[in-house]
Amino acid sequence: MENVIERNVEIPDMETAMNLFGHCDQNVRILEDALDVKIINRENEMKISGFESKVEEALKIIRKLLGIIGQGETITAQNVNYLISLKQENIGEADELPLDLVCLTARGKPIKSKTYGQKKYIDAIRRNTIVFCIGPAGTGKTFLAVAMAVKAFREKQVSRIILTRPAVEAGERLGFLPGDLQNKVDPYLRPLYDALYQIMGAETYQSNLEKGIIEVAPLAYMRGRTLDDSFIILDEAQNTTPEQMKMFLTRIGAGSKAIITGDITQIDLPGDKRSGLVEVQRILSEVDGLSFIYLTGRDVIRHELVQRIIRAYEQYENRSQSKAKRNDSMR
């Protein structure tokens, strides 16, 4: 039987302790419930008691959280749950923190990766000309790509930013919507506008948009063009056909970088259409100069309930597939 032990962690000041414990001690309660340990704060020390293996796990997580605080971050339930999930699933990650500064917003707020998956994504963008990022909603695929685009533009690595999406959801219904073509497609491009607006600031964003330095357009507008010296982002790429994906990838010109993001569990194409994002994984898997990054529910940085919803859907789909296979084998 395991020994019950107590370990102490020095907390440098009260502000750090308040950040670590969280609102109404919610961060510590998450740790206590998940690892079956008892945590209390006395003066400048945090005392952790419980079975030896669990206390050691808690110590490692708390030290990581203190490192995150040391980089000026506010600890959230998402941070705590993420580090616990890595331990519980025996996922060995590097000793370094997952935080990686991308850029600052117009208001001076730092944009950083928050998970190891996001950090790998940012590293891949730095190293490769083309990066495919595939993962569920809420993992920061689009926002981090836009942040990297703004960083490249500010550092004069590219002369313009081009953001595009297929307007698949509109389909034949575009003609029934009010306004000109731009008015009709704007709702499908709104997430891209919002990300740029937040990072660049209203005035800079609007000025660059009017000058043509920033272009936000439906994927159909890319046909026949060569996109040089640009940072190009194709969002919602699961809704491209194989032909559209090939068309987009062959637009990339000299001095350009392209990021393709999508969630292959949310394909809106008609039933008889194949997804270009699904197919391209088989076609380009061995090509040098590009990278495929896969984010999971563990990398979701929205409300923790989103992680639970994604896991529930994954479990449901796995059960449905297993049932279908059993039925097929019985025929």
Image: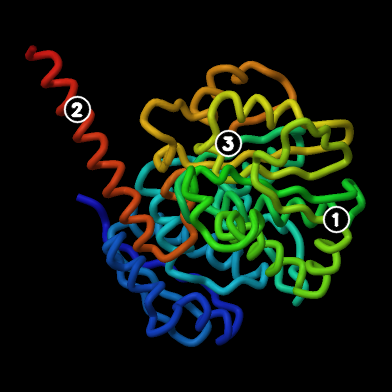
Numbered label tally: 3
Q: Is residue 60 visible?
A: no
Residue with the mark numbered 2: 322
Residue with the mark numbered 3: 293
Mark 1 or mark 2: whose residue is earlier in sequence: 1
Percent across and percent down for residue 295 are 50, 43
The residue at the point 77 percent across, 67 percent down is: 200
Which three-letter amino acid code belongs to the residue tagged 3?
Ile
Q: Quadrant of residue 23?
A: bottom left
Mark 2 and mark 3: span between their CA atoms? Answer: 27 Å
Mark 1, secondary structure of its residue: loop
Q: Quadrant of residue 256?
A: top right
Percent across and percent down for residue 323 are 15, 28
Residue with the mark numbered 1: 212
**Depth check: 67 or 280 in front?**
280
**Depth check: 317 or 43 in front?**
317
Percent across and percent down for residue 25 are 39, 80
Q: Quadrant of residue 252?
A: top right
The residue at the point 53 percent across, 65 percent down is: 65
Q: Mark 3 near mark 1, Cβ–Cβ under 8 Å?
A: no
Q: Is residue 185 visible?
A: yes
Position of 250 with respect to 210 (left or right) is left
